[in-house]
Image: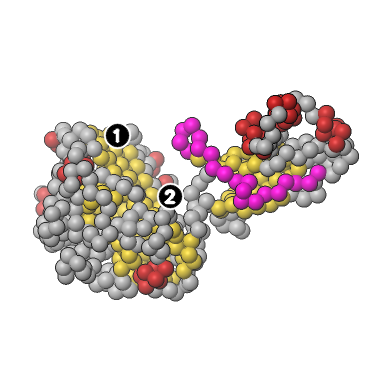
Amino acid sequence: MKKMTFKKFFGGICCAAMMVFAVSCAQGVDDEVYKSTATNQQMVSPTLTEANFSTVVNADGSESIKVSWDLIKGCGGCQCYVWIVDDPANPVEIVNKVVDGTSFLFEKLEDTDYKVSVLALGNKANNNTDATAATEATYSTKVPAILVPAGTELSSFIAENLDLEKVGEQAFELEAGQNYAVTGIIDFKDKLVTFRGNKVNRPIVTFEAGQTSGLMTAGGLKVKFINFDCTNMAFDKYVYGSSKETSTYNYAFLNMGDGTYPQLLSATNKGYVLADPIIFEQCNFKNLPKAFIGCGYNAWLVQDFRITDCIIQIKHCNLDHDNANFISFYKNCGGYNGEFGKAWTGAVQNVTIKNSTIYNTETISGTKKVRFMRWASKNGIKDIMGSHTGTFTIQNCTLRNVYHQGEFGNNIAEDAAYVVTYGSTIFYDCARVQKLANVGNNKSQLNLPSKNVGWVATPNNAEGGEMLSGNDKSKVKLTEEDPGFGEMTELDLTDSQFGGQNFKPTGTVSSTIGDPRWL
């Protein structure tokens, strides 16, 4: 036991001699008292309650869980085990050691269930024997959640159960392997919410009503361990409303607020800032008909948007509209002065996509270009935050047919303060990857920490058949290599790990990069 811990334990003792005695015993310097008072005994394992668990912030900013207990007199140490029990039938052992003291640490992971076992060991020198049983305790890093009954219509349930008075994070949890329907907008308002399923057996959420279903938030949102069926979502402009006061939403997936729940205006007074992150983790999406994320009616800046360990299957075919972009902060963002239909500003400051597969099963048609990401203007960040500072990072991903007609980015910041990172990613039938980084104009920073592969399989008729441009090969340094992918099919939501797909690459470089699930 460390000195600081003993100070807490003996908080009411101020005698200097007693403190020296306590510290000496804790450090094993003088255990004579235990020999005289704890001999010829059977040890008893320590009690473990919630109070015995705490979080420690490490020097590198990561966190650990600390398990501690009271000093056991005559004890020869404790045999300690920790398992991750997200799947109780298949526990994963992460700690197995004897602790000569009264505490130990292990890595803290988000949304994880643990089982801890501590057995007090005997001390032969004192003729003390092991405890007859270990103390076992469970611990979870999940935010306490409201459990949503299987089969529930989610937009109504969340509207009725969202705590509008609560300060801090709240959560809703769907039952493992169950089915849920959505017939309206799931509106999380300006609350900080975790919306989760089950890591091992994900529930399936089906958007039933194409004209009204989707998600909306004006606060931080984490969506985890849920599979979504987007087949019935309408293919149209992603958001429109009857007036500034009352709005009818029609959006493919996520709409970032309509001014009803405004965040603080930025220093430049030209838009709303959403500082808390929007996170999608370990979720699959079937038949997404248009944009994945976009702004609402007001000028919005989302500061932190992340996609991690997801498979997103798009079903885009007709591009003759303005909001087919995957990340679409283009039209209908509105003006900071309240004028509707004005694309004054709207952007995502920091985009991070990791360990994910995004693919489109349809052949693109239409005369308009489509982009992976498009803002209202290249000054989208600067208009709200005062500078172009921002990032786009795509790391260890597999992208296919996203999109083969158009270009990868448009209206993105043209400034050295904006950094685009491409790392270990396969771009298969993805038009003009260099356009997002604006490397043709040498404006934004392009970071290439590892090799990336580009390949053209589908002719780009709108641009004379060229898709992997000279800038893609020279400035983005894409290795031109056929990954050897097979046919694409619609996602199987019952297969959470692979979605019924096989994007295993076979090229010299491609077989070492991309979404790790295929490697």
What percent of the width, then of the height, locates residue 16? 70, 26
Question: In the figure, is residue 107 to the left or right of 185?
Answer: right
| Residue denoted by label 2 | 517
Other-residue count near label 2 (Cα within 10 Å), few / some / many at <14 / 14–19 / ≥20:
some
Question: In the figure, is residue 508 to the left or right of 81?
Answer: left
User: Which mark, by number, is residue 298?
Assistant: none
What percent of the width, then of the height, locates residue 242? 16, 70
Q: Name the residue nearer the viewer: 482 or 105.
A: 105
What percent of the width, then of the height, locates residue 281? 40, 53
User: Which amino acid type is marked by label 1?
Assistant: Leu
The answer to whether one can see residue 361 in this image is: no
Q: Is residue 462 depicted above or below 65 in this figure?
A: below
What percent of the width, then of the height, locates residue 326? 24, 55
User: Which amino acid type is marked by label 2?
Assistant: Arg
Camera-side mark, 2 or 1? 1
Q: Name the residue nearer the viewer: 322 or 315.
A: 322
Disc 1 on helix, strand or loop?
Answer: loop
Residue located 42% across and 68% down the image: 161
Q: How many marks?
A: 2
Q: Main secondary structure of the magenta part?
A: loop
Q: Are marks 2 and 1 in contact (CB under 8 Å)?
A: no
The answer to whether one can see residue 350 in this image is: yes
How many angstroms separate mark 2 from mark 1 (CA)?
A: 22 Å
- Label located before the other in sequence (2 or 1): 1
Magenta residue span: 43-62
Q: Quadrant of the N terminus?
A: top right
Residue located 68% across and 52% down the image: 136
Disc 2 on helix, strand or loop?
Answer: helix
Name the quadrant containing residue 433. top left
Other-residue count near label 1 (Cα within 10 Å), few / some / many at <14 / 14–19 / ≥20:
some
User: Which mark, by number, is residue 448?
Assistant: 1
